[in-house]
């Protein structure tokens, strides 16, 4: 059997090159269009929380909560969704054709707790999917409960600019 040894110097050099190249690929904050920048809110947004009971068996619990989003030009957002406050969230440009997908930006809120006392889920992963602005001072978002490859639409909410 013919085996060859890898020269440690070549291996180390390769790793250094990979690290240098990957440092240039790191995502920078998305610069946000001016029309999306600012404080947005809805005092009584109605969402549906989906709870899985078994295979293809779900319970849907409606909850009404306030939602506030402060979007900054540099691609950072501060959010309050129900009882949860979130800081320094990244606003990312949705990849692909916005016209076809209907979503321009996304905000990943990560894994969060109960949105209100009557929220049946102790933990859930939430994302805001922001639609292109069609009416001045109105931001339309979809609140998505993420579960593996199954993003459940909790609600479509109109937020007003302040």
Image: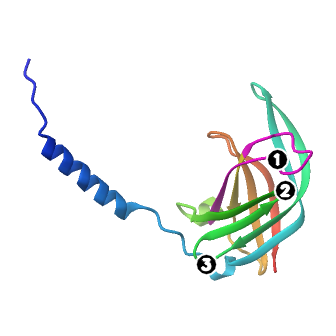
Q: Residue at x 31, y 55 (%)?
A: 19
Nearer the observer, 134 or 66? 66
Sequence-first disc among 2 and 1: 2
Sequence-first disc among 1 and 3: 3
Q: x and y percent of residue 42 in the render?
A: 86, 68
Q: x and y percent of residue 123 in the render?
A: 75, 42
**Is 27 placed left or right of 9 in the picture?**
right
- SS state under label 1: loop
Sequence-first disc among 3 and 2: 3
Which residue position is annotated with label 1? Answer: 114
- The outermost residue toward the left is 2
From the viewer's perspective, is residue 54 above or below residue 110? above
Report the quarter where the C terminus lies.
bottom right
Report the quarter where the N terminus lies.
top left
Which residue position is annotated with label 2? Answer: 83
Mark 2–mark 1 distance (CA, rounded to whole Å): 7 Å
From the viewer's perspective, is residue 83 above or below residue 55? below
Mark 3–mark 2 distance (CA, rounded to whole Å): 26 Å
Nearer the observer, 57 or 73? 73
Which residue position is annotated with label 3? Answer: 73
For the residues bearing labels 2 and 1, Cβ distance under 8 angstroms? yes
Mark 1–mark 3 distance (CA, rounded to whole Å): 29 Å
- The outermost residue toward the top is 1
Residue 154: image tag: none
- Is 105 magenta? The answer is yes
- SS state under label 2: loop
Q: x and y percent of residue 131 in the render?
A: 69, 66
- Is 54 magenta? The answer is no
Badge 1: residue crowd in 10 Å (few <14, some 14–19, many ≥20): some
Q: Give the residues in magenta.
A: 104-124
């Amino acid at each position: 059997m013919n085996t060859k040894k890898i020269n440690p110097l070549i291996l180390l050099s390769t790793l250094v090159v990979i690290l240098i190249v990957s440092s240039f690929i790191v995502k920078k904050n998305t610069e946000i269009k001016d029309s999306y920048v600012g404080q947005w809110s809805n005092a009584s947004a109605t969402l549906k929380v989906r709870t899985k009971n078994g295979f293809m068996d779900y319970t849907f619990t409606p909850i009404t909560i306030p939602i506030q989003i402060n979007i900054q030009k540099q691609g950072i957002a501060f959010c309050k969704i129900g009882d949860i406050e979130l800081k320094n969230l990244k606003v990312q440009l949705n990849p692909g054709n916005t016209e076809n997908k209907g979503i321009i930006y996304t905000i990943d809120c990560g894994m969060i707790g109960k949105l209100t006392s009557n929220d049946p889920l102790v933990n859930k992963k939430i994302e805001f999917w922001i639609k292109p602005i069609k009416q001045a001072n109105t931001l339309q978002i979809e609140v998505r409960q993420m579960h593996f490859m199954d993003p459940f639409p909790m609600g479509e909410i109109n937020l007003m600019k302040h």
